[in-house]
Amino acid sequence: MSSEPTFESAQRELEQIVQRLESGETGLDEAIALWERGEELYRFCLGKLDSAQGKIEQLATRGSEALARDADPKAVPASPVRPYQPG
């Protein structure tokens, strides 16, 4: 049973595939196989990024809601700023 790669390992493998394809030293069959693997890795990485973005947005929303809930609108700052009054 193969385990799912990490984002970083998939990205490294994808970079290696791009380098091999750009070198022009692969035969047609190998190039096609590399291209297909590259597409798989691209979709995997994109899915990981989408998932991470969703989690970050969820955490940011929860943090904002907690700040709003914990804020006391009647609270006075410890050292209020006084408006400038010319002397």
Image (cartoon, helix red, strand yellow):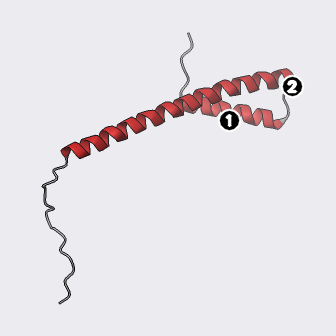
Look at the picture and state if 49 lies above or below 80. Answer: above
- The residue lying toward the viewer, choosing from 73 and 19, is 73
Q: Is residue 24 left or right of residue 68?
A: right
Quarter of the image where the C terminus is located:
bottom left
Question: Label 1: which residue?
Answer: 15
Q: Earlier in the sequence, mark 2 or mark 1?
A: 1
Q: Position of residue 78 (x, y in %)?
A: 13, 63
Q: Find the residue positioned furthest to the bottom.
A: 87
Q: CA distance from mark 2 to mark 1?
A: 19 Å
Q: Position of residue 24 (x, y in %)?
A: 85, 34
Residue at 21% from the left image edge and 43% from the top image edge: 69
Look at the picture and state if 2 lies above or below 70. Answer: above
Q: Which label is found at residue 81?
A: none
Q: Is residue 14 left or right of residue 67?
A: right
**Counting other residues with Cα less than 10 Å from the Cα at mark 1, is it few (<14), some (14-19), or many (20 or more)?**
some
Asked which quadrant contains residue 13, the reply is top right
Q: Position of residue 61 (x, y in %)?
A: 35, 40
At label 1, which amino acid type do we have? Answer: Glu
Residue at 73% from the left image edge and 35% from the top image edge: 18
At label 2, which amino acid type do we have? Answer: Gly
Q: Position of residue 33 (x, y in %)?
A: 77, 21
